Amino acid sequence: MQQDMVLCGARVVDPVNGIDEIREIGIRDGRFAALESLKSPRRVDLRGLVLAPGFIDLHVHLREPGQTHKEDIGSATRAAAAGGFTTVLAMPNTAPPIDTAERVQAVRQAAAERGVVHVLQAGALTLGRAGKELAGYASMQAAGVPALTDDGSTPQDSAVMRAAMQAAAALGLPIVDHCEDIGLSKPGVMHAGATAALLQLPGQPRSAEEAIVTRDIALARETGCRVHLQHLSTAGAVQELRAARQEGLPVSGEVAPHHLFLTDAAAAVYGVNAKMAPPLREESDRQALLAGVLDGTIACIATDHAPHTAAEKAAGWLEAPFGIVGLEAAVPLCLTGLYHTGFLSLSRLVSLFTQGPRELLGLPVGAMTIGAVADVTVLDLDAPHRLKVAEFASRSHNCPYDGWACRGKVVGVLVQGKWTGAAGYGL
Ligand SMILES: [Zn+2]
């Protein structure tokens, strides 16, 4: 058993409990504990730092099993911890896909042995992610799956998606969906706009995303299924989500940092490290996404951490896989671009990484409630630094942000009261 501990002097920001003040946090046996219950605790002086509930990333590709040349559970969770995340939701589009209870168990076992943060595993919607037959939801739920998705794609047959939503709703399982109509998106490799024309690359129209957003909202209305729209990228999608939420439908959405901070013009600057799905869009879309975050339409920021090797990304625009690593850049980018600009309060920003994901999945983490597992993200709000992709803990370094100047960084995390992070803080 660890010695009891009191974290002293830091500003504590916990949106779920309505806390934003300097106060002491007690930890006993890996859980938040009332100060008066502690026995001769060790006092740790964290003056000048911010403590938040451990951040939750709803969209991470661990690449295990089957693609461990890109990433594995050890490297991905070390990247998560370095980036300030104490819980990740792993996407099931591995090789093979996670579409049975046995495969869920295998990931959970590996995460228990080699993971340094909590790993939640999403289950596939359809067997083999082939979009035809539903996977066994009840058995995967019993194995610990908190959500279902075919991320990387979505069932193209809307009748399959309706059946999936009916089955998921009956179990109270949310569906988190990658909104892409491949009849409209293929063979596009970036947003269908001026930059695609300039680079003479095939584009993906906004309708490829919006057609599925519209479908999913209609099916959520019909089935009552809890639906979460992943990595939104277009102004139209944000508007549809806003209207659906105003209607009271059980629909939510997330945005990735790259869609908040980059546009399709980045393709001409960063090459294939600006190739992702859905693609970077135009400034008007970026502004609409920011507005969606500001007014609460979008309640979660998720990284869509998608590791690929340098060799894979070197295949060029047409052949290279979609995606960038995001775990170690997201929080510094958001502190710099959303908080220090005055766009969001610190509490609102923390909420996007804690309260939003917690409420979507009904998780017991994401708040510093007495008795809860003591997951804490420790931030130095003002530290100036540059992102150094070569120093990322992730096995892959496909990322456009190398050298970006940031203000504010992650000092480390406590996972169940155990410190992973920079030395010298007495933790
Ligand atoms: Zn996706």
Image (spheres, rainbow, N blue to C red):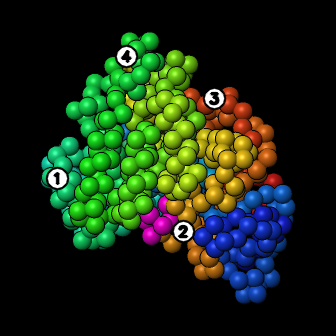
> Upstream in the sequence, badge 1 or badge 2?
1
The image shows residue 237, relative to residue 116, as above or below, that is above
Label 2: which secondary element: loop
Tag 1 secondary structure: helix
Residue 360 belongs to the span the image colors magenta: yes
Residue depicted at 26% across the width and 38% down the height? 181
How many neighbours does mark 2 have within 10 angstroms: few (below 14), some (14-19), or many (20 or more)?
many
Instruction: Return the residue at label 2.
Output: 365
Residue where numbered disc 1 is placed: 160
Q: Which residue is mark 4?
A: 201
* Residue 413 pos. (x, y %): 66, 58
> Dot 1: few (<14), some (14–19), or many (≥20) neighbours within 10 Å?
some
- The stretch in magenta equals 357-362
Residue under the image location 66 percent in, 67 percent down:
14
The earlier-in-sequence mark between 1 and 4 is 1
Depth check: give the residue in front, 82 or 353. 353
Please indicate whether residue 127 sits to the left or right of residue 304 in the image: left
Q: Quadrant of ligand 1?
A: top left
Residue at the image point whose x is 40% and y is 14% from the top: 197
Identify residue for label 3: 402
Q: Amino acid at mark 2?
A: Val
Spot occupied by residue 350 in the image (x, y as percentages of width and height): 63, 58
